[in-house]
Image (cartoon, rainbow, N blue to C red):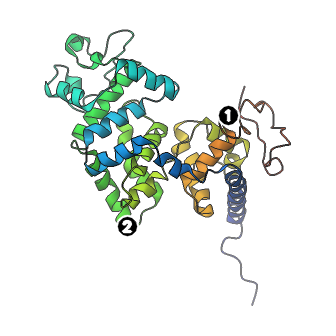
Amino acid sequence: MGKRRHPLSGKLAPNLKQKRSSQKHAIRILHAIYQLARSDKLLEARAVDPTRAMLRDALRGRDTGLIFDWLVLTLSLQGVSDRVAIEYAERNGSATWKALSADAARDPSCPKLSSFWHYAGCGYSKSLQTCARPDHFRNCPLPKLNLRNGRLNQLSWSLLLWIRDIADEDIVRWIRRRLRPTIRSNGSLQDQRERLLGPLRGVYGVSDKVLSLAFADLLLAAPPRWRDWRRLGGALIVIDTLVHNNLVRTGILSRSGTDHAYGPACYRPKGCADVIDRVAEQLRVSPRALTHAVWRYCSQDGLAICNGLRINDRRRCDNKYCRLHRICDRRKLHVK
């Protein structure tokens, strides 16, 4: 009898070999970073934050108003430092469920505010003091908010209308219903993440990054018995430029054939989040913990080893003192 031919021999074999090689490289690099920069007290350290106790009580009591107030402030932490955003809110106030709900209950004349679906294209501009329906601008409640910019005014009303019209004013029950099918069927964390965040992408002015940041904190604040919520909270990862650029420099993205620019593609299939998920599963660690280790390895507030201040991104990294120097591809970023 002749030698049996492997079913994956021929054209598929090199692709399979390349896939295994790229996965092995990703595991080797990220495992090394995790060992060097991990924070064993990541989740425990956040538990001392008094905000977590407040959120836990809000979740137990299904207090949509309190959750909204916290969510809208957290989602506004973009474009400037957290300190600047919070200080501005402390001086000028923030959007609240009570005030916005009262305004919505008065049936504003603008048809844009009649429902979440009608709200698309509001176009409010704080600097120009205009919008898509200037004929209703004088009586519109939206400009009453003294937020940092008009985009945050739009975000606040969009989130309010979303919770009112999509979540039926009960965000806790909505999350529970969204997660129940995948939890019962032992669906993957990726499926659960998509079922939770997918519908929220329709809210004006939010991205996967800020949604993941906010809902990770919310789910991790769940009572201890809500284990599925806390588990998903640990899988909601934030891909910032430091993490993305590290995956580029180390060659992880190029070897897997998934090179992409920083942005929404980081959260799409085969993007940065998928890479973190797969490696975290192999290492049997939380995706959140692995992402945080990569961030600490790069950040000026962490080990400050792999970032644009230490590396000339027009050339390959020449930091021979980096512990990963011999195994890293040291690819330059695509900088003109």
- Considering only vertical position in the picture, is 14 above or below 116? below
In the picture, the disc for residue 269 is none
Q: Is residue 226 left or right of residue 106?
A: right
SS at mark 2 in the image: loop
The residue that mark 1 highlights is 300
Q: Who's the residue at 29% across and 49% down the image? A: 172
Give x and y (percent) for residue 284.
Answer: 59, 63
Q: Position of residue 298 (x, y in %)?
A: 68, 39
Q: On the image, numbered disc 2 is attached to which residue?
A: 185
> On the picture, is 137 further left or further right than 316?
left
Q: Residue reaching furthest left?
A: 106
From what the image shows, is residue 26 above or below residue 55?
A: below
Binning the other alpha carbons within 10 Å of mark 2 as few (below 14), some (14 to 19) or many (20 upward) gives few
Classify mark 1: residues with Cα within 10 Å, few (<14), some (14-19) or many (20+).
Answer: some
Badge 1 element: loop
Q: Position of residue 190 (x, y in %)?
A: 47, 55
Q: Nearer the viewer, mark 2 or mark 1?
A: 1
The amino acid type found where label 1 is placed reads Gln
Q: Which of the two residues, 268 or 236, is positioned nearer the viewer here? A: 236
Placement of the N terminus among the 4 image quadrants: bottom right
Name the residue located 49 percent from the left edge and 46 percent from the top edge.
46
Q: Is residue 82 above or below residue 290?
A: above
> Which of the marked residues, 2 or 1, is nearer the chain's N terminus?
2
Front one among 25 and 222:
222
Residue at 45%, 36% in the rendered image: 207
Can residue 24 be spotted in the picture?
yes
Task: State which quadrant residue 318 falls in.
Answer: top right
Q: CA distance from mark 2 to mark 1?
A: 42 Å
Q: Where is residue 265? Give x, y as percent.
A: 54, 41
